[in-house]
Image (cartoon, helix red, strand yellow):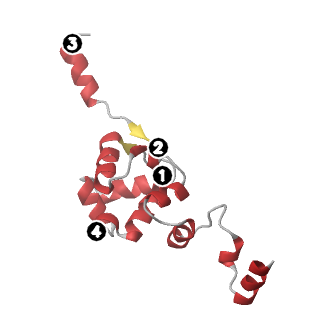
Amino acid sequence: MPKTLKGVISKMSVHNLNVPQIGLKLDLLLRTGKQGIKTASALSKRLNIAPDHLSRIKNGTRSIPDEVFLELTNIYQIEQKIWFENLEVFGQSLGLSSQEVSKIIGIRIPGIDFSSRITDKRMIKDIHRT
């Protein structure tokens, strides 16, 4: 294969990444308003992609292209390796506790103490006395 054609092919090929729980991570970022971005449409504009493309990435029906992922890491200033961590570690990198992540996203995260889910304050006092 001629050198020039090989260079063109390598420039044209785009690698796609499968970032675990990308939709929940993006929801967490949008709901906390990090970097002043609170809506998916605002994020899609910053990423220079169509809103439906971002929606497919969030829903997991489309993997994220390398260049979009790099732009995402630059916008939010989050290390690439953190994106591949679980949701709890990702949230901690944003300065959020596990309980805050759970509350914002609306899902239970394993390891959160059960006393945080108890609504009767008397039971909490009894637990801490023992």
- Residue 88 occupies which quadrant of the picture? bottom right
Residue at x 48% of width, y 60% of height: 91
Q: Position of residue 16 (x, y in %)?
A: 39, 39
* Above or below, comparing residue 75 to residue 112 in the picture: above
Dot 3 and dot 2 residues touching (CB under 8 Å): no
Mark toward the start of the polypeptide (4 vs 2): 2
Q: State which mark lies toward you, 1 or 4.
A: 4
* Above or below, comparing residue 33 to residue 23 in the picture: below
Specify few, some or many for label 3: CA neighbours under 10 Å numbering under 14, 14-19, or 20 or more: few
Dot 1 and dot 4 residues touching (CB under 8 Å): no
Say which quadrant the N terminus sits in.
top left
Q: State which mark lies toward you, 4 or 2.
A: 4
Residue at x 21% of width, y 12% of height: 3
Residue at x 42% of width, y 60% of height: 26
Dot 3 and dot 4 residues touching (CB under 8 Å): no
* Above or below, comparing residue 13 to residue 1 in the picture: below
- Residue under circle 1? 60
What amino acid does circle 3 point to?
Lys
- Residue under circle 4? 36
| 16 left or right, relative to 106 | left
| 76 left or right, relative to 83 | left
Dot 4 and dot 2 residues touching (CB under 8 Å): no
